[in-house]
Image: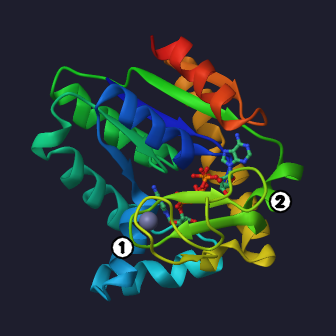
Amino acid sequence: MKIIMLGAPGAGKGTQAKMIADKYGVPHISTGDIFRANIKNGTELGKEAKGYMDKGLLVPDELTVRLLLDRVAQDDCSNGYVLDGFPRTIPQAEVLDSELTKLGDSVDYAVDVDVPDENIINRMSGRRACLNCGATYHIVSIPPKKEGICDVCGSDLVCREDDQPETVTNRLKVYHEQTQPLIEYYKAKGVLRTVDGTLPMTEVFDAIVKILG
Ligand code: AP5
Ligand code: ZN
């Protein structure tokens, strides 16, 4: 099963993608997490990506597409995957489609987690992330058991650098200009499914499970 998560920054794509990956036994692939891991490890890719991410801009397609195609070619992706944060532009979607077509394959579902812009700033300002294992919390709606500590691995939780209000505003603008057109793109292919992302996390997940079966 090949699933794409669509939605604005902070809509809950990562939160739902992890739950889908656990339930359906497919890898969760987040291009944002891959970039953040590269930044943490001080790689060349990380240094290059950081300049764009800190401004709320997209990392150029040349860097992102190769990274994603290498990742989905790995053995653990043979039964499918859930993509979170890719594709983010029409050219990225076209490359993914043409690579899948070569394999006689295609995307099964593009799940749009729909959250209005008004809710996004609150989601971002309350988000706390574990840079060690990738778990994500929200100080009000999805708090960790112990304040500031990751439930999964016990590491300290931090605010993401790109969650500052000015950067969030820019990310939303970039989303509307470059990523939102993918909703029509996948609708035209008949694989778009929309869920109400303003519902509590478990209800959003129930809606997704109904779709995926
Ligand atoms: P990326 O890491 O993909 O960020 P994003 O798309 O902006 O999405 P987020 O991770 O911010 O949010 P999310 O939708 O996953 O929400 P979450 O589940 O955390 O990308 C970062 C940057 O990397 C980009 O800006 C770009 O520069 C670069 N990049 C990445 N991929 C790229 C690509 N393909 N091409 C080019 N550049 C790329 O939830 C948010 C908060 O809300 C959390 O606190 C969570 O706990 C809470 N929450 C979740 N669900 C609910 C709920 N139902 N109710 C209440 N709270 C909830
Ligand atoms: Zn952790």
Residue drawn where x is 45% and y is 75% of the image: 155
Q: Is residue 75 left or right of residue 40?
A: left
- The image quadrant of residue 80 is top left
Q: Mark 1 sits on what residue?
A: 37
User: Relative to 70, is 132 above or below?
Assistant: below
Task: Work out whether residue 196 or residue 170 is closer to the camera in this orientation and state it.
Answer: 196
Task: Work out whether residue 164 or residue 128 is closer to the camera in this orientation and state it.
Answer: 128
First in sequence: mark 2 or mark 1?
1
Could you say whether the residue bearing mark 1 is in a helix, strand or loop?
helix
Query: Can you give x and y, in whole percent of width and height, for residue 101 in the image?
Result: 24, 26
User: Relative to 86, is 206 above or below?
Assistant: above
Query: Taking the image as four quarters, which one is ligand 1 found in?
Result: bottom right
User: Relative to 121, is 211 above or below?
Assistant: above
Q: Is residue 99 left or right of residue 115?
A: left
Instruction: Inspect the image, locate mark 2, and give the three-letter code of the amino acid beneath it.
Output: Asn
Q: Mark 2 sits on what residue?
A: 122
- Mark drawn on residue 96: none
Instruction: Inspect the image, locate mark 1, and give the three-letter code of the amino acid beneath it.
Output: Ala
The colour scheme is: rainbow
Residue drawn where x is 23% and y is 22% of the image: 105
Could you say whether the residue bearing mark 2 is in a helix, strand or loop?
helix
Residue drawn where x is 72% and y is 75% of the image: 167
Query: Can you give x and y, in whole percent of width and height, for residue 197 in the image?
Result: 72, 35
* Res. 36 visible in picture: yes
Q: Quadrant of the N terminus?
A: top left
Q: CA distance from mark 2 to mark 1?
A: 25 Å
Query: Can you give x and y, in whole percent of width and height, for residue 151 in the image?
Result: 50, 60
